[in-house]
Image (cartoon, rainbow, N blue to C red):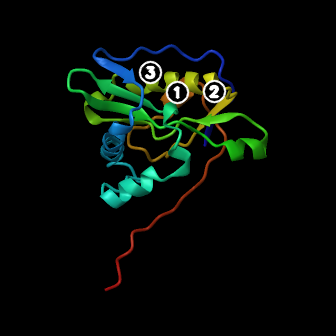
Amino acid sequence: MMVRPHLDGIPQAMFPPEIEVRPFAEEHLHQVYEAVTEAFIEHIHGSDPSEEGFQEWCAEDYLQDRSLWVIAWDVRSNKIAGLILNFILKDENEYYQRKRGYVEHIAVLKPYRRMGLARAMIAVSLKKHKDRGMHEAGLSCHTGNPFNPLSLYFAMGFETRYLLRVYSKPIQPLL
């Protein structure tokens, strides 16, 4: 778990050429889910590409305020290049008496990686949270992530709050 303890001094970041952020439109919901699924295919917590997986994902309470999402589009192909599905947990903020927004589901599709897209989307995300009155931002990072985003998160002002170890072991299904 990482936290950026304030939303002052958000680093400037430029989007790569031919990439633009567009407001979320409901007709793009399936396309967003497909991009999340594609981007996280190599991740331990990959998405379920089935229609049932899509329906369950759409119903998640924390993903309902889609105005916080940052979706970067390739203007040449009109396809999603990357996205961040930001959210605010109102009940959690009330319980802990804080104002934290979450910068989560940070995804950059393969053709757009290593171009500064994630940095630019995080900067926009932090500004969105600040504009909503949040004082800090949180994110979770899987340290086994094959893209090792920790240095990016540190550069964007996030600090490690705590580590959680998860052990897993593949099991054979019973016949």
Residue furthest toward the left? 77
Helix, strand or loop at label 1? It is: helix
The residue drawn where x is 79% and y is 39% is 97
Q: CA distance from mark 2 to mark 3?
A: 19 Å
Residue 132 badge: 2
Q: Which numbered disc, 2 or 1, marks the residue closer to the eye?
A: 2
Compared to residue 61, the image places residue 88 above or below, namely above
- In percent of width and height, residue 67 lies at 50, 32
Query: What amino acid is found at the position of numbered circle 2 in the picture?
Result: Arg
Residue behind mark 1:
125
Helix, strand or loop at label 2? It is: loop
Q: CA distance from mark 3 to mark 1?
A: 9 Å
Viewer-proximal residue, 170 or 117? 117
In the rendered image, the quadrant that contains the C terminus is bottom left
In the rendered image, the quadrant that contains the N terminus is top right
Query: What amino acid is found at the position of numbered circle 3 in the picture?
Result: Ala
Q: Earlier in the sequence, mark 2 or mark 3?
A: 3
Report the side of 61 relative to 30 (left or right): right
Compared to residue 90, the image places residue 11 above or below, namely above
Query: What amino acid is found at the position of numbered circle 1 in the picture?
Result: Ser
Residue behind mark 3:
120
- In percent of width and height, residue 144 lies at 45, 47
Residue 4 visible in image: no
